[in-house]
Each structure stands twice: as structure tokens, then as C-alpha cells.
Image (spheres, rainbow, N blue to C red):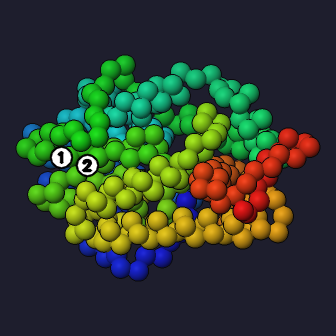
Amino acid sequence: MQSQQPSKLTFPIPVPPAPGSVTDIAPGIRWLRLPLPYRLDHVNIYLIENDGGWTALDSGLGDEPCKAAWQAALAGPLKGQPLRSLIVSHFHPDHVGLAGWLCQQFDLELTMPRPEYLHSLLLQFAPADYGEDVFRPFYKRHGLSAEATEVVLSRGHEYLKRTTGVPASYHRIKHADTLAVGSRNFQVLTGGGHALEQAMLYRPEEKLFLAADQVIARISPNVSVHPMEPHLDALGIYLTSLRAIKASVAPDVLVLPGHGLPFHGLHDRVEELIDHHAQRCGEIAIACRQTPLSVAEIVPHLFTRPLDAHQTGFAFGEVLAHVNHMLGRAELRLETDAAGVDRYWTT
């Protein structure tokens, strides 16, 4: 995820809730923030009023600090107001990580898009070395050194395992569904690119848009390509989703994102994100104009600050997403060298 400088956004509540506390962000909706052990150090949870209690959107990472933050909130500002159900937007561990624990502790039904649920289930039962026989040649083909590959693999699997699993049954939601939560009905929107079929909730009557990670104010969601689908145009899928959001969600909604601060200015932010990715493609075109470059060689042209292993994996996947998008638009051409490494020229 890369920092952005939004120009026209406004933030109605400029200070996030303190650990263990909640903030009223809209009538019948409360905002809880949980800690993450990464550079992006938090995830937002939204609580929607439901029959004297709450339905939670997303769960946090499956670790002890997130459990402790939930317990503090439930024993403090949420005391006597039980959790009624859980909606999870997508399979990333900072969103689904505590789903199993919360559902078991509080006898909750899990609501989730099918691809996101099934991928969570796959990772839950995957062996410790899941996918490594695919990841190593994938990274090698795109120019990452063997040493860097091993470090990225070890950190990446640690990240994916920070979950408490998902229940054996769930309630499926899909695009264009109507989801009842207490006395409210929400329109379900879904979008790919960052995840598989990430769920968002829209309540036009109240000008509320719970955007998960699809639209965030000051960072661009990571859009990556992975070995399972090495030729996927993830960026094209994401850009299509952004345009669909702009077409179907009103410009004056309050956006409740998965990270950062709630904000006004959805359509402006969508255009900023589209422009950001166009700029990234332009930077790649310039970098590959003089000599063909592998994905690993392109990474430092786009990410100039030092990256740890966790960030390197994200950066690598994001560069490949842009490369695949540009290949599909005939803005790059592919050459494979004698060592079997793919390199890209600007057309």
C-alpha cells in the first residue's frame, strides 16, 4: 500500500477511537479500532445496531492483542450489548482472523461472500508449506533472488496463519443482495482486485457506505497477482470495481473504510486512485524504455524506500499486477531470457 495525498476529502471525526473504546460514527453505528503488528498498524471494525446488540463488520487479526481489544470493548462501552452476528468483508487475516473465535465465543452466524469464505477455509486447512512448490518458480521467473524468495515465503505464511479459522457453515452474500441488519437493509456491493469478491455495504437512505478495503482515504489498497493466477489482470478488475462504485454510490456518502479515517469525498477519492494507478503504469513504462526489466527489477523504481520482507511481497505482487494490466493493453512486450526470467520492454 502506498501513501496518497488526498486533495478534496473531509474527515468528520479526525481522531480514531482509543484501544478498547468505541466512537459513535453514525446513528446506530459504532467504530472500534484494533491493533495490527505491521506498518499499517490498525484495522477498523464497525458495529451496526441489531436487536439490543450489535452486528460486527470484520473481526481483526487472530492474535492476542486483537482478542484483548475485543474483550475490553465488550466489558466496557459495549457491556450488556451482545454481539448478534458477524459479517466479514474478505479473506485477509486482519479482517477474518478472529472470525472463528468470535463465532465460537458468542455463538454467532458468519456472513461472507462465497469466494472469500472458501479461500479462508482453504488457508485454514493448508499445510505449513502450502504453495511453496509454486511460489519458488514463480518468484524465480520474475527475477527475485533465491534468498529474497525464502524470506518473503516465511513472512508471508506467518501472516496468512494469523487466523482462528472460520465456522463450518456460513450465510452467503453476493453482489446486489439486500442484507437485513436489525431494522436496516443494506445493499451488498462486491468488488475484486484487492481480494476476490470483497463485500461492501451501502445504505443510500442514510448516505452510508461501508467500503472495507476497496476505497481508503490516504493509502491505495494493495492490488497483487499471485502464483495461483499468474496472468490475472487484478489491476483491471480493481479499476472496473472503482468505476462501478462511482456509478452506483452517491458522491456525498460517509465512507467507512477498513483502515484510516472515515471520510466524505468518495468520487474524488475514486478518481485519485484511478489516477494513482495510471501514474504507476507510466513509471513502469519509463523504467522499461531503455532496457528490459524483470518484475523484481521494476520494484525499486516504484518503491524507493527500504522494504522489509513483508512489504517486499506486497510490492512484488503489485508491480506484477501493473505489468499484467499493461501487457493486456499492449503497453509492454514480454521477453524471456536464457535463464528463464521474464523481462518487459515498453512498446
Secondary structure of residue under mark 2? strand
Location of mark 1 (residue)? 186
Tell me how far mark 2 sits from mark 1, CA to CA: 6 Å
Q: Is residue 104 left or right of residue 305?
A: left
**Residue 30, image x, y percentages:** 22, 55
Q: Is residue 185 left or right of residue 290?
A: left
**Residue 262, image x, y percentages:** 31, 65
Q: Is residue 42 visible?
A: no
Secondary structure of residue under mark 1? strand
The reply to whether discs 2 and 1 touch (Cβ–Cβ < 8 Å) is: yes
Residue at the extreme bottom of the image, as rendered: 7
Q: Which amino acid type is marked by label 1?
A: Phe
Q: Nearer the viewer, residue 294 or 99?
A: 294
Q: What residue is drawn where x is 39% and y is 43%? A: 198
Q: Which amino acid type is marked by label 2?
A: Leu
Q: What residue is drawn where x is 28% and y is 71%? A: 264
Q: Is residue 187 visible?
A: yes
Location of mark 2 (residue)? 201
**Residue 94, image x, y percentages:** 46, 45
Q: What residue is drawn where x is 16% and y is 57%? A: 204
